[in-house]
Amino acid sequence: MSATYCRYPRASYGPQFIGFDALLQALESDPACKSSIEALDRLIDEEAFHIKLSMPFGRAQRDKALQLLQKLRSSVAKTRVTAIMGILYSVRCNMVHGNKRFAPVQTRVLAPVTTLLRKVSVVLYDKLRNYVE
């Protein structure tokens, strides 16, 4: 994984357009999304997988994972949404730039990530559609 390809700020464009409060409300009011956020929190907390990896060898960076987890647990919408998007973006980077071997934990990670990504996409699409109309 190259830091050139995985720039964290890119993950904030959608939430900035949607609004951090609006996006968090959409995610937390959806039972599947709320459950997905809780599942990712547990997986990171229990070190079931390594969300933050060093370049170029992919070594776990527990300190960065704990910082992300702290932000995920924040009561501030912008901080919490930024953490959720950071998780989605980190998983994306790990999938694109990481090794291609399959591990069973990937299913436990990708299921909640897919749920959240789907919801963010729908909310963003709705916002764009209303913006154009």
Image: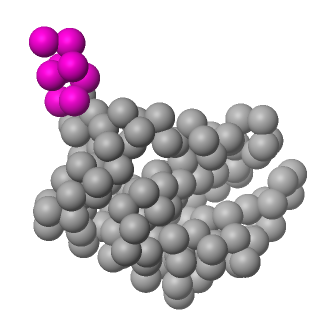
Residue sticking out furthest to the bottom:
46
Measured along the vertical axis of the image, is residue 7 above or below residue 114? above
Q: Quadrant of the N terminus?
A: top right
Q: Position of residue 76 (x, y in %)?
A: 40, 68
Q: Is residue 25 left or right of residue 4?
A: left
Tell me, yes or no, whether the highlighted magenta stretch contains residue 132. Answer: yes
**Total count of labels:** 0
User: Viewer-proximal residue, 121 or 133?
Assistant: 133
Q: Is residue 124 left or right of residue 98?
A: left
Measured along the vertical axis of the image, is residue 105 above or below residue 112? below
Q: Which residues are magenta?
A: 126-133
Q: Position of residue 58 (x, y in %)?
A: 78, 60
Q: Position of residue 74 (x, y in %)?
A: 43, 75
Image point (49%, 42%), residue name: 12
Image point (52%, 42%), residue name: 11
Image point (69%, 49%), residue name: 98
Image point (67%, 64%), residue name: 52
Residue 115 visible to an observer of this rendering: no
The rendered magenta stretch, by its main secondary structure, is classed as helix
Q: Quadrant of residue 101?
A: bottom right
Residue 43 visible to an observer of this rendering: yes
Q: Is residue 103 left or right of residue 84?
A: right
Measured along the vertical axis of the image, is residue 54 above or below residue 41? above
Residue sticking out furthest to the top:
133
Q: Quadrant of residue 3?
A: top right
Q: Position of residue 128 (x, y in %)?
A: 25, 23
